[in-house]
């Protein structure tokens, strides 16, 4: 999907640049009576030139605002007796997403890791099966995330674990 967006941005950018160059070129093709292709053209040659420059500046701004930005990967850094430990937040997120397999009610979990100076916040977005005990599953997941971070990765400074149920899936099929 990103390549389609990049292609479309490139086509629009090329179109804007071509328009700017064409507008700037209008004064070159005016005769003494300011006629172009049999039609009288309004405005002065300098107005056409400056309009073309304005369009090219717009093209440059378009390119700068639509350029793909590489998101710099974030790391959680903490000091242990043996030295510094740096763990990518993406790696922590992937590690935590595997916890969903331990809970049959969780169909999908997308954890987001927010690293602060020496602490971490976890936001886990869930898609769950309809179950009367959803709140208990969420509480157990919060505890399991904290345990997993402490025991598996050595991260003990967890400020907050937020669980958000984004979707509840029901197995009921409509009657025909």
Image: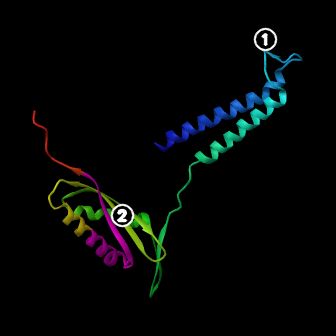
User: Is residue 102 visible to the viewer in this orientation of the structure?
Assistant: no
Measured Cα–Cα span from mark 1 to mark 2: 66 Å
Element type at mark 2: strand
- Which residue is disc 1 drawn over? 38
Q: Residue 66 carries which label?
A: none
Residue 172, quarter of the rendered image: top left
Q: Coloured how?
A: rainbow
Q: Which residue lies furthest to the bottom in this view?
A: 81
Residue in front for this viewpoint, 125 or 89? 125
Callouts 1 and 2 close, C-beta under 8 Å = no
Please provide the residue range marked out in magenta: 142-167
Using the image, determine if residue 97 lies above or below residue 16. Answer: below
Q: Residue 22: x, y in percent?
A: 74, 28
Using the image, determine if residue 104 lies above or below residue 29. Answer: below
Residue in front for this viewpoint, 9 or 169? 169
**Total numbered labels:** 2
Residue 164 located within the stretch drawn in magenta? yes
Residue 176 located within the stretch drawn in magenta? no
Nearer the N terminus, badge 1 or badge 2?
1
Kindly identify the residue that appears in the image at 33 percent across and 75 percent down. 152
Using the image, determine if residue 67 lies above or below residue 77. Answer: above
Q: Residue 166: x, y in percent?
A: 30, 54
Q: Quadrant of the N terminus?
A: top left
Kindly identify the residue that appears in the image at 55 percent across and 55 percent down. 70
Kindly identify the residue that appears in the image at 69 percent across and 35 percent down. 17
User: Is residue 38 visible to the viewer in this orientation of the structure?
Assistant: yes
Residue in front for this viewpoint, 84 or 50? 50
Q: Which residue lies furthest to the right in this view?
A: 32
Question: In screen coordinates, is 94 left or right of 31?
Answer: left
- Which residue is disc 2 drawn over? 123
Judge the density around disc 1: few (<14), some (14-19), many (≥20) Cα neighbours within 10 Å.
Answer: few
């Amino acid at each position: 999907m990103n390549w389609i967006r990049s292609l479309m941005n490139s086509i629009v950018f090329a179109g804007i640049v071509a328009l700017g160059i064409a507008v700037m070129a209008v004064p070159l093709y005016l005769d003494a009576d300011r006629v172009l292709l049999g039609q009288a053209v309004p405005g002065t040659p300098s107005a056409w030139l400056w309009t073309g420059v304005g369009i090219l500046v717009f093209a440059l701004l378009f390119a700068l605002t639509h350029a793909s930005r590489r998101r710099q990967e974030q790391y959680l850094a903490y000091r242990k007796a043996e030295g510094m430990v740096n763990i990518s937040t993406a790696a922590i997120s992937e590690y935590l997403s595997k916890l969903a397999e331990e809970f049959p009610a969780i169909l999908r979990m997308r954890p987001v890791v927010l690293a602060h100076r020496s602490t971490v916040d976890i936001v886990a977005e869930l898609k769950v099966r309809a179950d009367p005990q959803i709140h208990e599953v969420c509480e157990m997941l919060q505890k399991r995330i904290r345990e997993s971070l402490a025991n598996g990765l050595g991260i003990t400074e967890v400020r907050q674990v937020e669980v958000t149920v984004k979707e509840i899936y029901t197995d009921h099929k409509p009657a025909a």
